[in-house]
Structure formats: C-alpha cells, structure tokens
Amino acid sequence: MYIQVACFALAFIASAGTIVTCFWNQWAITSGAASTSLLNSIWGFNGIWVQCLQYTTGQYQCDDYGTVLFNMPASMNAIRAMMCIAVCLTVIGCIVILCGMECSKFFEEAPNRKRKMMITSGVIYAVSGALVLASSAWYTSMVIYEFFSFANQDNLLRYELGAALYLGFVTAVLCFLTALICCCMPGPRQETDKYESSYPLTRSQKIEFPTAVEKSKHKYMDYV
C-alpha cells in the first residue's frame, strides 16, 4: 500500500509538472541582455503560447503568435497538440490511480479490477511521458538550430534553452517512473486466483468416483 501511495505522489507531481511545462512561457530565453534605441529591451522569453519582451522600465510586451492556428508553424502546432494531450492524459491517469489504489473504496471487493485500473494508468502515464519528452526534445532542437544558424548571427536577441524545457525532461522521467511502478506493482490479486490452475486436469488426474459393485455371479446360483 505504501508503494501505491508513493506512486500516487509521483503521479501528482508528474501531472503538475506537465501542466506547468505546458503553460510556462520560458521554453526559450535570451542568451544575454540586448539594448537598442528602439526597443531598449533587456531580455526576452518565449513559450509555446506567447513570446514576450521585458523593457528597461520593467514592463512586458507579449504576443500570442496570433489567434489563427494556420498562421503558426506546423511544428509549433504539433508541440501544442502533444502537450495538451499530455496534460489531459496525466489528469485522467492521476484519477485512475486514485481509484485503483488498494486503500481506495472504489471496487473494494474486486482486487483484479483495481489491478487493471493501475495497469491502465501506467499505460496512460507512459504515453503522456512520451508526448512530453517528444515535445521538449523537438523544441530543444528548434532552439539549438536557430541559435547556431548563420541567418541568426546578427540578431540582437538570441535564444537559449529555458527552464520550462528542463522541467519538461524531468516531468517525462517522472511519468515513465510512475508508469513503471503502476505496471510492475499494480496490487494484490484475488485470493481465489491463487488456487486456480492454469492447465485443465488430464484424464489421469480426474477424480474417479466408485461405481456400484457388480453383483457376483455366484449370487444367482441359488436359483438354479
């Protein structure tokens, strides 16, 4: 039971990390302070939903990449979709783990059903971890490519990896660890399952009941 409680704690942390990673606007940050006569900006930071600049006055100016999805690059739309799916899956998986725990009152008289729920939640967290890992790795490759691109050498703002990306990688590891615990230790089986045989009884193993004793032929000698 204590392992399942620890598994639920990991699942909750992984769910919270997925939500924060999805909506945190520091997937990429500027590598250094940049200042011009037009912008007077100190640093910038981008997320998958907004891109912002902070000025010397302390004010922020953010752009939501436009309201039309078709104006966005296909890679950014794909990362958004994967992160949104991962958020939904982690929330659902956390609820399923809570219902499938041994100490839970849900399906209290059906341990096998609880085991199936724990295994299902493990699969859910494995998929969500893969989505978070793919999104973080994809965005990381985009930032690294733009940082070393020759077309970006003269730009005043050059972006590096942000804290949200590191949180995304840690969250993916937590999701995979939660999935491993759920699948490997889903809980006890029903007591009847311990005594059930997986192989049918052979003819030699079947119990033979005694049949009626045949009447002796000598019994009919009295009537001759």
Image (cartoon, rainbow, N blue to C red):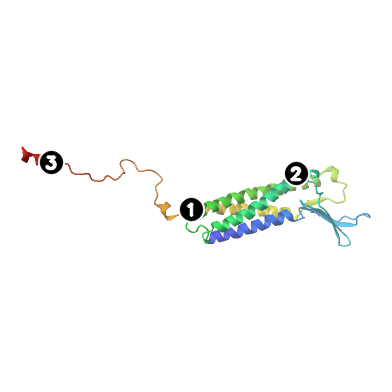
Name the secondary structure under disc 1.
Answer: helix
**Residue at point 9%, 39% (across, down):** 220
Numbered circle sitting on residue 112: 1
Instruction: Determine which of the numbered discs, if any, sits on residue 165 in the image.
Output: none
Q: Residues within 10 Å of mark 1 (few under 14, many from 20)?
A: some
Answer with mark 3 or mark 1, whichever residue precedes in sequence. 1
Q: Position of residue 197 (x, y in %)?
A: 39, 47
Spatial distance from mark 3 to mark 2, Cα to Cα? Answer: 92 Å
Question: Image check: 29 left or right of 126?
Answer: right
Circle 3/circle 1 CB separation < 8 Å: no
Q: Which mark is residue 216?
A: 3
Residue at mark 2 to residue at mark 1: CA–CA distance: 42 Å
How many residues crowd around disc 3 within 10 Å: few (fewer than 14), some, or many (20 or more)? few
Q: Amino acid at mark 3?
A: Ser
Residue 196 in the image: x percent, y percent? 40, 49
Q: Position of residue 215 (x, y in %)?
A: 14, 42
Q: Is residue 172 visible?
A: no
Nearer the camera: disc 2 or disc 1: 1
> Mark 2 = which residue?
75
* x, y percent for residue 146: 80, 45
Q: Which amino acid, by three-letter code, is at mark 1?
A: Asn
